[in-house]
Image (tube, rainbow, N blue to C red):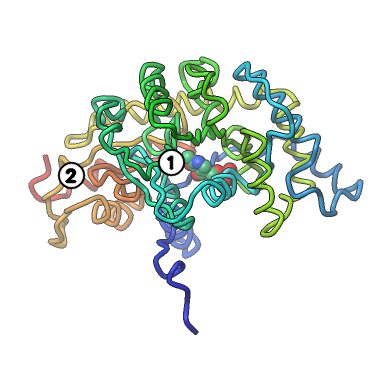
């Protein structure tokens, strides 16, 4: 059977692939430490699970409006006001099947074939394919580790063309764990005004920042851009609810209505009782988020300090998320005991999986081949053991630094 060219050109998600490989090895009884996962290791807090159980018991199992449960749309507005001081109306909120679907629907809603979207690198793996699936063209602008991965404003401007429609921002960032400075966000805001662009602000890690400050996005420094900013968020990361698949897009009503039309002809509403659970997450006690944030902060520091001690490895200190991005290019060119050369992030990740039984995601998946992404959504003991295994595996390389 012939597959569509669209599907033939679509690359599978590299992060999900590494995660699946690690889980398959584990299922065979191999003792793999999985530092590739993009999800918290914590259980969904009890009061949230209880809300879902109650919803099921009350028969909350039927179709909802495609655009989402009114109560959840309100809860999203409530959190935006609590966390950012931003006032939105429920009509400006679309509830989706995870933040991923919010991004997908927005791309389909905003892009025509050939329209260009600026994506700052390193970027989350799914941005380029999501843009391409809508016929758009991702235009990658690279940031540098020594500059907080913030490209110079001139570098961004130089990539703006007649076809540029918008820019995707993600801070705190997956994979770097960096948080964009207010200065940088202001500079991007200026370009957005000058060039008449829209912004998709993927705020999925906004609550997981280690400086203890409230969440911030481009609207925190440029409230005047409200009519051209789409906020994307969800319950996956902050509330340890990755499998529940609830996210949202917030922005001008006209765009939200258009994206809801697409949802009405594709998936319809996100799961009904999961939406009830999300209401409990957003409006209930928030100390669960704080406990997880503190645990991630402690692990981030541990992993950063431990990796810094390994010759040839330069970790970037995470400012948020549960990812650490580390430059391993210092060991590229070395040979494994079986004579294979470590040439790039893929050969390194393969070697670490085989030799150290540690799964990490090759940086090339995020547009930065010198790096690996290590997730610290694992307990400290696992992280300690993982670092020790990585160190031993690297010491076995010929010409190791
Ligand atoms: C930057 C970023 N955006 C969006 C998502 C999607 O999250 P969700 O589980 O809500 O679809 C992820 C998940 O890994 C992510 O890292």
Residue with the most extreme right position:
58
Label count reads 2
Earlier sequence position, callout 2 versus callout 1: 1
Q: Left or right? Give the position of 308 relative to 45.
A: left
> Foreground: 213 or 168?
168
Residue 249: x and y, percent? 61, 38
Residue 268: x and y, percent? 72, 55
> Foreground: 346 or 270?
270
- Looking at the image, residue 309 lies above or below residue 278: above
Picture residue at 76% right of the left edge, 32% below the top: 280
Q: Is disc 2's CB within 8 Å of ligand 1?
A: no
Q: Residue 156: which disc?
A: none
Residue 33 visible in rendering:
no
Q: Left or right? Give the position of 181 relative to 275.
A: left
Residue 190 visible in rendering:
yes
> Foreground: 142 or 273?
142
Residue with the most extreme bottom position:
1
Q: Nearer the viewer, mark 2 or mark 1?
A: 1
Residue 90: x and y, percent? 74, 32
Q: Mark 1 points at which residue?
A: 165
Q: Left or right? Give the position of 161 relative to 320.
A: left
Q: How far apart are marks 2 and 1 (CA)?
A: 48 Å
> Foreground: 8 or 397?
8
Quadrant of the rendered image containing residue 177? top left
Quarter of the picture holding the C terminus? top left
Residue 125: x and y, percent? 41, 48
- Looking at the image, residue 267 lies above or below residue 73: below
Q: Mark 2 points at which residue?
A: 395
């Amino acid at each position: 059977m012939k597959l569509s060219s669209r599907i033939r050109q679509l690359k599978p998600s590299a992060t999900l692939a590494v995660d699946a490989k690690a889980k398959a090895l584990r299922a065979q009884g191999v003792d793999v430490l999985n530092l590739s996962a993009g999800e918290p290791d914590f259980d969904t807090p009890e009061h949230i699970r209880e809300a879902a159980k109650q919803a099921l018991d009350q028969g909350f199992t039927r179709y909802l409006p495609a655009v989402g449960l009114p109560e959840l749309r309100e809860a999203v507005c409530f959190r935006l006001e609590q966390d950012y001081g931003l006032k939105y109306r429920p009509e400006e909120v679309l509830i989706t099947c995870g933040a991923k679907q919010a991004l997908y629907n927005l791309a389909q809603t905003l892009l025509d074939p050939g329209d260009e979207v600026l994506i700052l690198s390193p970027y989350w793996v799914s941005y380029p394919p999501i843009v391409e699936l809508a016929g758009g063209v991702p235009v990658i602008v690279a940031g540098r580790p020594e500059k907080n991965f913030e490209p110079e404003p001139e570098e961004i401007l130089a990539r703006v063309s007649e076809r540029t429609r918008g820019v995707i921002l993600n801070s705190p960032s997956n994979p770097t764990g960096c948080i964009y400075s207010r200065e940088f966000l202001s500079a991007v805001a200026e370009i957005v005004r000058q060039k008449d662009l829209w912004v998709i602000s993927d705020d999925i890690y906004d609550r997981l920042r280690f400086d203890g400050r409230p969440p911030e996005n481009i609207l925190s420094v440029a409230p005047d851009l409200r009519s051209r900013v789409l906020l994307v968020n969800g319950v996956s990361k902050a509330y340890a609810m990755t499998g529940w698949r609830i996210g949202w897009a917030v922005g001008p009503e006209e765009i939200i209505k258009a994206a809801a039309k697409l949802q009405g002809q594709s998936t319809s509403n996100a799961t009904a009782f999961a939406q009830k659970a999300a209401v409990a997450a957003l409006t209930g006690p928030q100390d669960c988020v704080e406990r997880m944030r503190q645990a991630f902060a402690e692990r981030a520091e541990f992993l950063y300090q431990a990796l810094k001690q390994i010759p040839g490895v330069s970790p970037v200190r995470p400012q948020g998320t549960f990812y650490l991005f580390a430059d391993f290019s210092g060991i590229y060119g070395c040979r494994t005991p079986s004579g294979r050369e470590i040439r790039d992030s893929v050969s390194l990740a393969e070697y670490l999986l085989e030799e150290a039984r540690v799964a990490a995601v090759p940086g090339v998946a995020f547009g930065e081949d010198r790096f690996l992404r290590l997730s610290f959504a694992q307990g400290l003991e696992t992280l300690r053991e993982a670092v020790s295994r990585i160190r031993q595996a690297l010491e076995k390389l010929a010409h190791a630094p």
